[in-house]
Image (cartoon, rainbow, N blue to C red):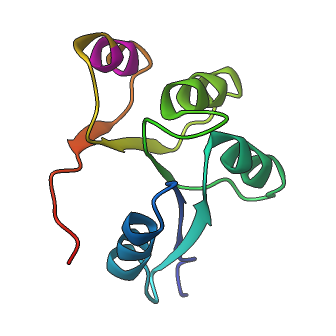
Amino acid sequence: MMKAPLQILTVEDENAVAQILALVLGGPTAKVTRAVDGWEALMKIGARERPFDLVITDHRMPRVGGLDLVRRLRVRKYDGKILVLSAHLSDEDIQAYEDLKVDMMMSKGFDII
């Protein structure tokens, strides 16, 4: 029996970063869906029967940012993995994400050429 592909939602307003994530993570064992901000992510999450296995979110985005998105996911009892990918996290932001029990935080310290 073949296992269903991993369902990944990337929430990223920078097109180049979103494309890299889709290229690196996508394939026969994973399906990557993109949202450009937290608001669009919440709409896509709410419209699905099967929840995403992983949400990868930027921190700074228009309309609904990463921290607010994670707060709303926790209110909705989302139990998948959450990874925060950002170049701009203050100590307060890091503490807030830790309090919300995100699974991982990574810095956007890579160059896209």
Instruction: Decide whether the magenta segment is chiefly helix, strand or loop.
Output: helix
Residue 32 placement, left or right of 46: left
Establish if 39 lies above or below 31.
above
Nearest the viewer among 70 and 109 is: 109
Q: Give the magenta-colored segment's residue range.
A: 93-97
Q: Quadrant of residue 39?
A: top right
**Residue 46 % position (x, y):** 80, 46
**Residue 62 % position (x, y):** 60, 39
**Residue 84 % position (x, y):** 37, 40
Residue 24 placement, left or right of 5: left
Q: Residue at x 26, y 41 (%)?
A: 87
Image quarter where the N terminus lies is: bottom right
Nearest the viewer among 9 and 53 is: 9
Q: Residue at x 63, y 31 (%)?
A: 73
Residue 42 placement, left or right of 29: right
Q: Residue at x 53, y 40 (%)?
A: 61
Image quarter where the C terminus lies is: bottom left
Establish if 26 lies above or below 40.
below
**Residue 85 % position (x, y):** 33, 45
The stretch drawn in magenta includes residue 110: no
How many labels, in total? Answer: 0
Q: Residue at x 38, y 81 (%)?
A: 23
Establish if 74 lies above or below 56.
above
Establish if 71 lies above or below 15.
above
